[in-house]
Every structure is written in C-alpha cells, then in structure tokens.
C-alpha cells in the first residue's frame, strides 16, 4: 500500500478492533525482534504539558549533538508528525515500511496465537519503536497516549527516567473521576528503581505519585511552584529563574508566552540534569536547547501578535485564559474560535468571555462528523455578551478576517487541536503571499 492507503487503513482500525493489553503489545514486539530493547527512552505522562516537556527534552538532547526520536500524539496535519527524527517527520517510505513490518508481525500473532488485531494507537506505537530502532537513534522521547498504567507505551520495561507533568480531570470515562484516581493511572508508568520527576503543584496528585515512587523504590524528585520565579514575560517569550533546593538559581529563557511553560521547561531541564552522567551535555547547551524549543500549536507565536493554542480541556482553557489576561491590559484581544461537538464548547466560551472580555471574536468550523457550525458558536458568544462577533465558515477566510480585526493588538486562535492543525496547514500553504 502507498502512504495514503496506509493512513486510511490505520484510521479505520477503531471500527473493527477492541481494547488490547500490554501483553498483547509485547507479543507483537517479540515477533518484531523486540526493537524497544535497544532504545534509550525517557517516558512522559500527565494531563497537560506532556507534549511540551517532550519537545524541551528533544531540543536539549539535539542541541547536545544527539540523534533523537520523538513520539507524540495527536498529529496536527499528517500522521508522520507522530514520529520525528532530528526534528523532522519521517518520510512516507519509512512510514509505510514500518507499518508493513508491524502488520506482518501482527498477522502472525493473530494466526498462531489467536490474538486480536492491534488497536489504532498500538499500531502507531509499534511503528514508532521500529522506526527509531531501524534509524539507530541515540535517544527516544516517548509521550504516553491516554493514561499511563494501561497505556500501550507502558510496554517499555526499562526507561532512563519517567516524568509526570500536571494532572487534571480529563478522559474521566477511562481514568477515573477524581484527581487521585487519575494520578494513580498516570503513576503506573513508574518502573522499579527508575528516577521519576514530577509536578507537585497538585497535592492530591503528588501524594499518589510519591507513594507509588516509594513502593517502586524509585528516586523521586518533586517540583513545586516555588521553584520557578518569573522575571519577564513579553511577546517574545518568558525569562525565569529555576530554583531547586540546594542548587544555585538558573536563569532559563523559553520562546513561549504562557507562564505554565515555566514548569514544563523546568521538569525537562531538571530531568536532563539528573541524567547528566548518561548524556554529558553541558549546562549552556541545555539552556540553548530550551530557548530553541519548537512545539507546534501550544501557545505558539506564528506571527507577530498571533498565537495558536490547542487548549481544549478544562485546565488547558484556564491556562490559556491566564495568558491572554496577562496581555489584555496593553492589547486589544481578538479570538478565533472553533470546537468539535464532543467537547464542552458552551462552557469554554463562557469561561473565555468571562475571563478575557475579548474585543472581537471570529468563529469558524472544523470539517468532519463532529463539526459545529460557525454560526452556532457565534450565537453563543453573542449570548455571552460579545456583540463584535462574526461567523466565517471556512478556516482560511476566518483567519484572514481575524487578522484584520486584530490590528495592533493580539489574536489568539483557540478551541481545538484540529483548528490549530488546519490553521498551521493553511498558513504554511499561503506563506509568502
């Protein structure tokens, strides 16, 4: 099959398979020759920020001269984005070759051992491990999908370190209703004796993670809010001090305007410091790596005063609002918004209006079976009191209209990672016009 046929097959997998176990994933890996056994892996879990932490790790290791494989989800435009090597998505031929090897092994496991077909995410993980093994990367930065304990990525048996980022309520139908329940699922990635670095700002989550680390006899390093101290926050990014007890403060610079990125950068930086004997990257290179980090559509400045953010759950929207409010006192704020039908978009709109009081809003719509009409979204904004609201169904024209309304102020494009991905694709296509 060619690339398009391969992607279509993978996307149709949820229609005919069922949830599988880690043992199922391991059986296929064994049939593939255990490609994961030769990989040096840093495993990252959590609710919000794990992709950003992965990006910081990837950038620091790359700045240190290493060839890095980065596995993240979801993709924004093309499925290849889930497998990055040296900051570049793998090519279509590599993608298809890995898929063929995964499916050959899967068919043998299905036929000879009576196992079920691998799931959508399982296939992608297996492909990633095969690609990184075949390309002989020096390190792999591995982001969990959903959860931790039962996540397919938890098949990794001996990572260099584990990181757990901030935890909040999301995917409660799978992970539990309470923070301790969700934290217990995320803490399932902790392996015996493997260092764990985690965000300790939520005390309920921190207690669960700390107890699991003690049970697994894992060196545990908790980062508190007091360990980050903001120096400046401008349109160009943030400068802050990272202060770990017993160490001199370190001034770090990140190319993002969201203050929550200080903790994400600190988690990644401190993990790299704890792994120094493994990689031997000097501190100045780590700091350059953090400053050069690129993570698409997570509070990403794509043009002067234009920020795209994929925030779509409760905590993500709250953090987006906090960032926008910081700039509200000096800038008029325009919002470009869209959402998919299975997200709580009415509540999101209420929170955005109540928190930011935007000057202008443009709503648009994401194509697909979960589409919410732009006019329906606009009606909710108007009901919330934003009279300067326009509905533009097509994303490209909606973005152009929002940019025109922005003027010298700031434009935040928010509501869905699907919106973020489509915007990035449109901007790339029209670059230079």
Image (cartoon, rainbow, N blue to C red):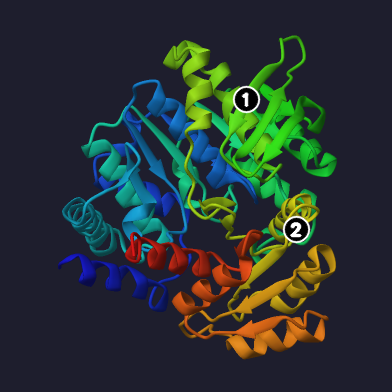
Residue 312, given in percent of the width and then of the height, sits at 64, 64
Q: How many angstroms separate mark 1 from mark 2 (CA)?
A: 24 Å
Please tell me the numbered disc located at residue 15: none
Q: Is residue 195 visible?
A: no
User: Is residue 229 left or right of 257 when viewed as pictured?
Assistant: right
Occupied quadrant, residue 199: top right
Please tell me the numbered disc located at residue 252: 1
Quadrant in the picture for the N terminus: bottom left
Please tell me the numbered disc located at residue 321: 2
Quadrant in the picture for the C terminus: bottom left
Residue, x 46% and y 55% (percent of image)?
Answer: 73
User: As rendered, which of 114 and 166 lies closer to the eye?
Assistant: 166
Occupied quadrant, residue 351: bottom right
User: As rendered, which of 230 and 122 lies closer to the eye?
Assistant: 230
Q: Earlier in the sequence, mark 1 or mark 2?
A: 1
Residue, x 74% and y 51% (percent of image)?
Answer: 327
């Amino acid at each position: 099959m060619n690339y398009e046929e391969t992607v279509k097959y993978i996307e149709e997998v949820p229609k005919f398979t069922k949830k599988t176990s880690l043992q199922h994933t391991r059986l296929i890996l064994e049939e593939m020759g255990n490609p994961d056994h030769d990989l040096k892996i840093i495993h990252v879990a959590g609710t919000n920020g794990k992709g950003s932490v992965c990006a910081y790790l990837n950038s620091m290791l790359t700045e240190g001269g290493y060839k890095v494989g980065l596995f993240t989800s979801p993709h924004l435009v093309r499925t290849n984005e889930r497998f990055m090597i040296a900051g570049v998505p793998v090519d279509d031929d590599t993608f298809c070759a890995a898929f063929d090897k995964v499916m050959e092994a899967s068919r043998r496991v299905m036929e000879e051992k009576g196992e079920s077909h691998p799931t959508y995410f399982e296939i992608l993980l297996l492909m990633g491990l095969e690609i990184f093994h075949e390309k002989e990367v020096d390190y792999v930065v591995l982001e969990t999908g959903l959860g931790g304990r039962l996540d397919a990525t938890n098949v990794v048996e001996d990572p260099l370190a584990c990181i757990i980022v901030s935890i909040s309520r999301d995917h409660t139908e799978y992970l539990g209703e309470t923070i301790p329940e969700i934290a217990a699922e995320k803490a399932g990635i902790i392996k015996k004796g493997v260092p764990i670095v985690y965000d300790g700002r939520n005390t309920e989550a921190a207690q669960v993670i700390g107890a699991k680390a003690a049970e697994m006899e894992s060196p545990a390093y908790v980062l508190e809010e007091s360990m980050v101290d903001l120096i400046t926050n401008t349109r160009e990014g943030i400068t802050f001090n990272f202060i770990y007890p017993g160490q001199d403060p370190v001034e770090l610079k990140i190319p993002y305007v969201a203050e929550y990125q200080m903790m994400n950068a600190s988690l990644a930086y401190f993990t790299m410091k704890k792994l120094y004997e493994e990689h031997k990257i000097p501190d100045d290179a780590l700091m350059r790596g953090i400053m050069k980090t690129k993570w698409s559509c997570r509070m990403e400045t794509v043009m002067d005063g234009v920020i795209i953010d994929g925030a779509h759950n409760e905590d993500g929207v709250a953090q987006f609002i906090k960032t926008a409010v910081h700039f509200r006192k000096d800038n008029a704020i325009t919002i470009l918004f869209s959402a998919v039908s299975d997200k709580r978009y009415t509540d999101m709109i209420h929170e955005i209006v109540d928190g930011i009081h935007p000057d202008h809003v443009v709503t648009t719509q994401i194509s697909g079976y979960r589409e919410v009409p732009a006019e329906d979204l606009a009606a909710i904004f108007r009901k919330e009191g934003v009279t300067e609201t326009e509905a533009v169904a097509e994303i490209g024209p909606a973005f152009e209209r929002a940019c025109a309304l922005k003027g010298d102020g700031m434009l935040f494009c928010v509501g869905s990672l699907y919106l973020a991905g489509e915007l990035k694709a449109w901007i790339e296509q029209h670059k230079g016009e």
